[in-house]
């Protein structure tokens, strides 16, 4: 019987994202607790920003009717620092004004102080050395935010600048989506935790710290179920425990076809497996499905399951597949825009003459000449390639190229954002 062709990276991602639905629950949090969260509702501004027409420069508020020619001299009738409100500006006068101060009634322009000169024995006159235009250096009331209008839309990921907008709008709390809850465990009798003595033939578990850090960097609540022994029953039992109170289970290792790889039969027994193996390198043995919640009392079928993504055990494969597939899946659970990050055309400063039948993601780094260098060892077990590199080169199946050709580059800064 002929095996069906493996899904491409895009087909696999489309399948994952077609299943992901944003969490529905939300909570009200303080502004400082909202960083890295996703807005659950539209946010309306409580005030106009700015609340009054104000100046964006230190200088002099004037009437353009009084400054039709350069060199006109006006009496300085008032002084308006930020936080004060001036009085009606009379014809033939100017107001000394400072950045952020409201423009006085009657004034229709501000002349910055560099374009003026003080005159008069009492330094009470100003010579305006340019012809200002109406509205010059004036920020209009409500030009940033309008009271009662939407300042931030539902689904917005809250960065420092969005919190600044919310503060400008007069808000103290924001209604945000609850955090996505992710369980993770790692399989392999050969694994030890750093700090423990290595058993014969053993290795330290690097995937635990890498994957948990990736989960937490996305603002999720992460539960670490540790290293699970290589047995079917232990794997099934951990899946049952992890299904409780979590939106997603992530595993690393045990998704291949060896006799000690128990993830596939365990997930099949405890739920369903929708996808297994994709045509990429590194990361072919990626699995996706769902695990029945062990305390299933919910009549809603979608809420009676916990999503499952099984990552390969090799450290680079695990890291790369998390970035390419798990990250966008989690983003969609959070209610954020998800998909393959934007790639950029960059010059390869090396030859690649051994195209694989799979879509390859090579670890590369931008060099001082603005091109890409290749880490010399692209083995899926060499995690230092990911530490050395600053991004991935997306090489299509069967593709080869020589130095100087343009290739698709995805920076880690986009994949880890």
Image: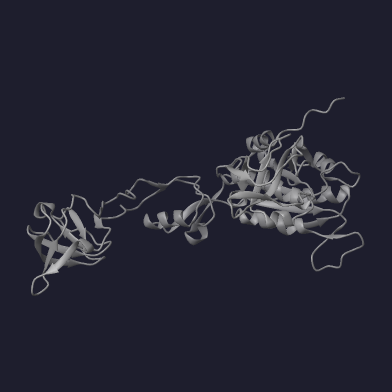
Is 240 left, or right, of 181 in this rendering? right
Looking at the image, can residue 35 be seen? yes
Is 197 left, or right, of 244 in this rendering? right
Quarter of the picture holding the N terminus:
top right
Of 270 and 384, which appears nearest the observer?
384
Coordinates of residue 68 in the picture (x, y in percent): 10, 52
Is 264 left, or right, of 139 in this rendering? right
Whether 200 is drawn above or below 286: the answer is below
Of 305 and 43, which appears nearest the observer?
43
Q: How many marks?
A: 0
Res 258 → quadrant: top right
Task: Describe the colour scheme in one phrase.
Answer: one colour
Is 242 left, or right, of 58 in this rendering? right
Coordinates of residue 326 in the picture (x, y in percent): 67, 45
Looking at the image, can residue 170 be seen? no
Q: Name the residue rendered at 63%, 35% in the picture.
A: 18
Coordinates of residue 193 in the picture (x, y in percent): 80, 63
Coordinates of residue 247 in the picture (x, y in percent): 67, 47
Whether 289 is drawn above or below 206: the answer is above
Res 336 → quadrant: top right
Of 389 and 210, which appears nearest the observer?
389
Whether 113 is drawn above or below 18: the answer is below
Q: Residue furthest top?
A: 1
Of 71 and 38, which appears nearest the observer?
71
């Amino acid at each position: 019987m002929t095996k069906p062709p493996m899904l491409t990276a895009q087909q696999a991602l489309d399948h994952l994202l077609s299943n992901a639905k944003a969490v529905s629950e939300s909570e009200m949090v303080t502004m400082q607790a909202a960083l890295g969260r996703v807005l659950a509702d539209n946010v309306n501004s409580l005030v106009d920003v700015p609340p009054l027409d104000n100046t964006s420069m230190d200088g002099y508020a004037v009437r353009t009717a009084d400054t039709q020619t350069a060199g006109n001299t006006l009496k300085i009738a008032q002084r308006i620092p930020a936080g004060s409100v001036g009085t009606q500006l009379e014809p033939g006068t100017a107001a000394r004004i400072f950045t952020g101060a409201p423009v006085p009634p009657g004034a229709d322009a501000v002349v910055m102080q560099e374009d003026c000169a003080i005159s008069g024995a009492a330094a009470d006159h100003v010579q305006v050395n340019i012809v200002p235009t109406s509205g010059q250096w004036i920020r209009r009331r409500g030009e940033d935010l309008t009271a009662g209008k939407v300042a931030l839309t539902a689904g917005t990921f809250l960065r420092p600048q969005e919190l600044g907008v919310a503060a400008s709008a007069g808000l103290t709390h924001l209604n945000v989506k609850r955090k996505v809850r992710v369980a993770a465990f790692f399989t392999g009798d050969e694994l030890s935790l750093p700090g423990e003595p290595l058993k014969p033939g053993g290795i330290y578990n690097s995937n635990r710290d890498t994957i948990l850090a990736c989960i937490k960097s996305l603002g999720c609540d992460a539960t670490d179920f540790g290293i699970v022994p290589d047995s079917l029953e232990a794997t099934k039992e951990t899946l049952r425990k992890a299904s409780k109170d979590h939106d997603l289970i992530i595993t690393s290792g045990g998704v291949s076809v060896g006799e000690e790889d128990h993830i596939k039969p365990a997930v099949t027994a405890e739920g369903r497996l929708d996808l297994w193996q994709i045509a990429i390198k590194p990361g072919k043995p990626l699995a996706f499905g769902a695990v029945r919640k062990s305390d299933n009392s919910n009549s809603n079928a979608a809420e009676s399951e916990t999503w499952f993504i099984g990552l390969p055990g090799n450290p680079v494969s695990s890291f790369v597949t998390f970035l390419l597939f798990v990250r966008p899946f989690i983003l969609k659970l959070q209610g954020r825009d998800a998909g393959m990050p934007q790639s950029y055309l960059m010059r390869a400063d090396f030859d690649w003459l051994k195209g694989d039948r799979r879509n390859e993601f090579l670890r590369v780094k931008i060099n001082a000449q603005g091109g890409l260098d290749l880490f010399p060892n692209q083995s899926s077990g060499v995690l230092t390639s990911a530490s050395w590199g600053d991004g991935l080169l997306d090489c299509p199946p069967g593709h080869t190229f020589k130095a100087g050709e343009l290739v698709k580059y995805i920076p880690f800064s986009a994949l880890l954002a």
